[in-house]
Image (spheres, helix red, strand yellow):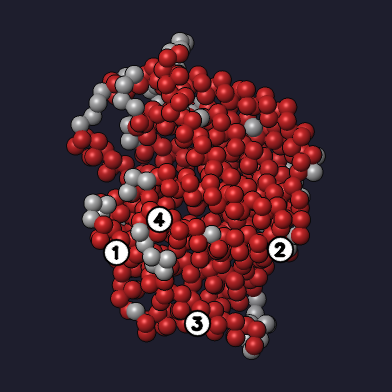
Amino acid sequence: MKDLHQSETYDTVKSAALKSVKWSALGEIFSRFVHPVIALTLARILTPADFGIVGVAMMVIGFAQIVWDFGLSKTLIQREENLDDLANVVFWINITFSLLIYLALFAVAPGLSEFFRSPEVVDVVRALSLLILTSSLTAVHRALFQRRFQFKRLFKITAASVLVPGFISIPLALNGYGAWSIVYGTLLGGVLEVWLFWWLSPWKPHWGFNSALAKDVLGFGAWIMGEAFLLWMIGWGDSVVLGHFLGMEDLGVYRVGITFLTFVFGSLLNHFLPVIYSSLSRLQATPAGLTESFLRIIRLIALISLPVGVCLVFLAPSVSSAIFGLKWKGIEVVISVLGLMQGIGWVVGPNHELYRAIGRPDVNTKLTALLIVYYLPVYIWAAPHGLRVFCIARAVVGVSSILFYLFFSRRVLGFPWTYLWRPVKSPFIASVAMGGVVFFLVHMTGLFDAWSAWSKFFGILFFGSTTYISVLLMMEKKLIMEFLVLAKQSVR
């Protein structure tokens, strides 16, 4: 186990890291692409209620995984000493916690069923909670692979464990297994992942437990767990409230709509994030250059996110009809309203990367906690009024939360309140012009009334993008060139 104990030189680490970037990025892109594609394929077969039931189980599992891992696997990447003993301690702590949490979830499943008013939730939660056990069996191996920069192996494991559930779930769904088609496929993917990690990893646990080391790493993990809990609240808080008040069908419609939006914006923008973080990190010693680079990044993201958000407002009915079908009634509201919100919200996304780059990740934690306090009361008020009202309220608080970002930017970075206007002005004006033209063509002329769903989709997209690019070229041709340069860098 030489590689667990030996300290690497800077050049060795740098070389290994550079070689691993490609495989790390491929794994991230593959996972983010395949998961939504499988989910959207299943959406054509299953019902919204099926997705709602599974969604409840997944949000519970996401919360439970915060507790059982306790942030301990990250210590294996961060620490330099006693790695073999540390890996063994983390493994047995994870196993113990996961067993206790699984038993707890097994016991509280009937209560969750009552909270979400769905009898089917009991068995699905109990079955999918087994993922906590499979995850605990692979957490240490995954962390050690990351520590050794073995991202090529991680990519292979990710590819297999992501693809196999789709090959299982889709045939089962076609044969009438409903929500259980997702359950069986997901569990098989978890078992396959365990087998692959244990087969490919040279590390194996052994009997024995270092109590002093365990106490040390538990203190470290508590801070990571706190941040993970806040992120869970941001990611699942809306679904918890919506599922409780409106039931499984509306929750399923909402979650699949969010999955679609994540796929659209993620496919277009997620691959920029590593470039953003690297660029800002290198410029942290030169404040003027850091600020200018940060504003340029916002401008280039707005170039994509704002028109996509506006297009989704008009494309949502066509997308709903062509991709999802009639049984997903209401999903067009999720896609249009929250699509516009995400299009606007992405312009403050680089703020998180900036705070990490300057060594202030605590700002992200404080900002996330403040947003939760702001969001949750609105969710609770809006949910009983129906899915449409909930989505509108969600969009209003999401867009208005930009004020919190502006406050922190002013307080931490010294930016003026109006710093966002300069980088987003041109994309904003071009997007408004695009929206006005498309609205006129659709609602005032009836041009698309007789078109099929897909023809309407591409017709709106053509007129909208032509208008957007034309206005943008008249205002700032240089902006287009900057975007093309960054796009080229991001896919190298």
Question: Which residue does the numbered mark 1 point to in the structure image?
Answer: 292
Instruction: Name the disc covering residue 389, or none.
Output: 2
Please state the horizontal and vertical placement of residue 146, each as a whole percent of the image: 37, 34
Q: Residue at x 55, y 63 (%)?
A: 400
Q: Is residue 97 visible?
A: yes
Residue 292 figure quarter: bottom left
Nearest-to-viewer mark from 1 and 3: 1
Which quarter shows the N terminus?
Answer: top left
State the SS at label 1: helix
Q: Amino acid at mark 1?
A: Glu
Element under disc 2: helix
Q: Identify the residue position indicated by label 4 in the image.
A: 411
Residue under numbered circle 3:
433
Q: Amino acid at mark 2?
A: Val
Task: Give the distance between the C-alpha atoms of the residues marked 2 and 1, in whole angstroms.
Answer: 39 Å
Between 345 and 460, the one nearer to me in the picture = 345
Residue 173: percent from the left, percent from the top?
Answer: 69, 47
Instruction: Check contact, mark 4 vs mark 2: CB within 8 A.
Output: no
Name the N-terminal-most of marks 3 and 4.
Answer: 4
